[in-house]
């Protein structure tokens, strides 16, 4: 009889224990389902891994579509993240890290990639101290990564703009200070002049300096107007690239005839893009004008316009057989303000055209690069989004 009571009490205790386990199980299931966290449990001896439904759903799979081996997850880790993924995990197995933590991209069922925060910890070891079981979690951190990337892009943009603003401010200060200094010097000489003819010379010098100052202010205003129009997309329209180039060539017909320039417009008629046509027109105009200005006097100038097309971009090329630029000396200065590279060969060069061109290209969200060889020619490549 006594044994029966003990058995009854033990059954009650077991039932209560099972009930508590079931309750705890529901609690954990509810917590997981409402926290978007997946769970994995790796048996190091058998290499079997339990992946919860949440882990599988994060990458677009149903529960039955992923097996219970570590390779099911490992093979889907992005190739660029795989080395750090294995390194961090193995470091934890060796006891070098208290907790395994790694962020990596995982390939989803549809081929896209999702960012995962992977955390785990060894919970049991054998008699030799080797891990036998590791339990961990998966968290989808894609949105956080997107925010981080956006912040990084904005930070890089702000840093770049600050650098350019600092450079621009320095240039403005230098140029205006130079003109003011010239004014002061001329006025001082004017006061010391001993004859009317000397004073007249000083007045003529003042007029020259005044004209130069006006041109400088006009140039700087042109640059400021580009920098202030940061939202160029609002002015975008769909245009035919060949037609834009053709109109630019027509506007330069006098210079083209004067220098006997042969221009080849090889841009296909089927190339369209959404862009600010005013800026695009100005970019092409500046590049062709630049090619004409620095054409060779020993051969007929030839300028070729062409483009390469990818899925999302168009690369416009403007190539000439002019006098070229020594990139070994001037590569880092090509697109800087008031930089000239041909000495007194072109006295009308102010070193502002390429700076404005680069500024406009960047305002369009594009890039510009140059390839040039002295006495052979120059090729500018402008890459824009379609």
Image (cartoon, helix red, strand yellow):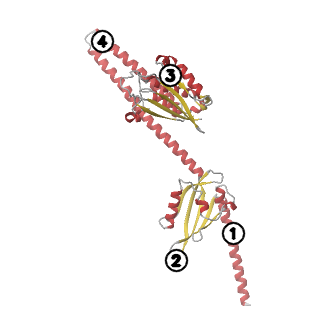
Task: Tell which circle, 2 or 4, labels the residue nearer the N-terminal end.
Answer: 2
Q: Residue visible at 54% across and 19% down?
A: 251
Task: Tell which circle, 3 or 4, labels the residue nearer the N-terminal end.
Answer: 4
Residue 225 x/y as whole percent: 50, 27
Q: How far apart are marks 3 and 1 (CA)?
A: 85 Å
Residue 3 x/y as whole percent: 71, 89
For discs 2 and 1, the disc positioned in front in the rendered view: 2
Are discs 4 and 1 less than 8 Å apart at CB? no
Q: In which quarter of the image is the N terminus?
A: bottom right
Q: Quadrant of the C terminus?
A: top right
Q: How far apart are marks 2 and 4 (CA)?
A: 104 Å
For discs 2 and 3, the disc positioned in front in the rendered view: 3
Q: Residue 127 carries which label?
A: 2
Name the residue that disc number 3 marks: 262
Q: Residue visible at 55% across and 45% down?
A: 150
- Local packing at callout 4 (Cα closer than 10 Å; few below 14, some 14-19, many 20+) is some
For discs 3 and 1, the disc positioned in front in the rendered view: 3
* Position above or below: 9 against 224: below
Secondary element type, mark 3? strand
Task: Tell which circle, 2 or 1, labels the residue nearer the N-terminal end.
Answer: 1
Name the residue that disc number 1 marks: 23
Q: How far apart are marks 3 and 4 (CA)?
A: 50 Å
Residue 195 x/y as whole percent: 26, 9
């Amino acid at each position: 009889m006594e044994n029966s009571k003990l058995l009854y009490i033990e059954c009650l205790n077991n039932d209560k224990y099972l009930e508590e386990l079931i309750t705890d199980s529901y609690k954990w299931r509810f917590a997981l389902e409402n926290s978007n966290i997946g769970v994995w449990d790796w048996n190091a001896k058998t290499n079997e891994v339990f992946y919860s439904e949440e882990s599988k759903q994060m990458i677009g799979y149903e529960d039955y579509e992923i097996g219970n081996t570590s390779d099911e997850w490992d093979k889907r880790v992005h190739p660029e993240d795989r080395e750090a993924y294995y390194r961090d995990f193995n470091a934890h197995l060796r006891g070098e890290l208290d907790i395994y933590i790694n962020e990596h991209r995982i390939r989803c069922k549809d081929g896209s990639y999702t960012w995962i925060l992977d955390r785990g910890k060894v919970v049991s070891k054998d008699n030799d101290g080797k891990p036998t079981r590791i339990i961990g979690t998966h968290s989808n951190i894609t949105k956080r990564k997107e925010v981080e990337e956006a912040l990084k892009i904005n930070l890089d943009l702000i840093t770049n703009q600050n650098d350019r603003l600092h450079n621009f401010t320095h240039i403005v200060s230098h140029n205006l200070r130079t003109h003011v200094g010239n004014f002061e010097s001329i006025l001082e000489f004017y006061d010391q002049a001993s004859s009317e003819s000397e004073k007249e010379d000083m007045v003529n010098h003042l007029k020259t300096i005044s004209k130069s100052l006006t041109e400088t202010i006009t140039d700087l205003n042109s640059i400021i107007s580009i920098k202030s129009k940061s939202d160029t997309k609002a002015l975008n329209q769909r245009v035919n690239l060949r037609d834009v180039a053709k109109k630019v060539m027509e506007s330069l017909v006098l210079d083209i005839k004067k220098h006997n320039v042969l221009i080849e417009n090889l841009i296909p008629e089927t190339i369209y893009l959404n862009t600010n046509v005013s800026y695009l027109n100005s970019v092409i105009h500046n590049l062709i004008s630049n090619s004409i200005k620095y054409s060779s006097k020993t051969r007929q100038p030839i300028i070729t316009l062409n483009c390469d097309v990818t899925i999302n971009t168009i690369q416009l090329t403007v190539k000439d057989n002019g006098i070229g630029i020594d990139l070994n000396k001037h590569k880092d200065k090509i697109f800087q303000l008031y930089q000239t590279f041909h000495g007194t060969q072109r006295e009308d060069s102010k070193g502002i055209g390429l700076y404005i061109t680069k500024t406009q290209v960047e305002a369009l969200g594009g890039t510009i690069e140059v390839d040039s060889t002295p006495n052979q020619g120059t090729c500018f490549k402008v890459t824009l989004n379609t």
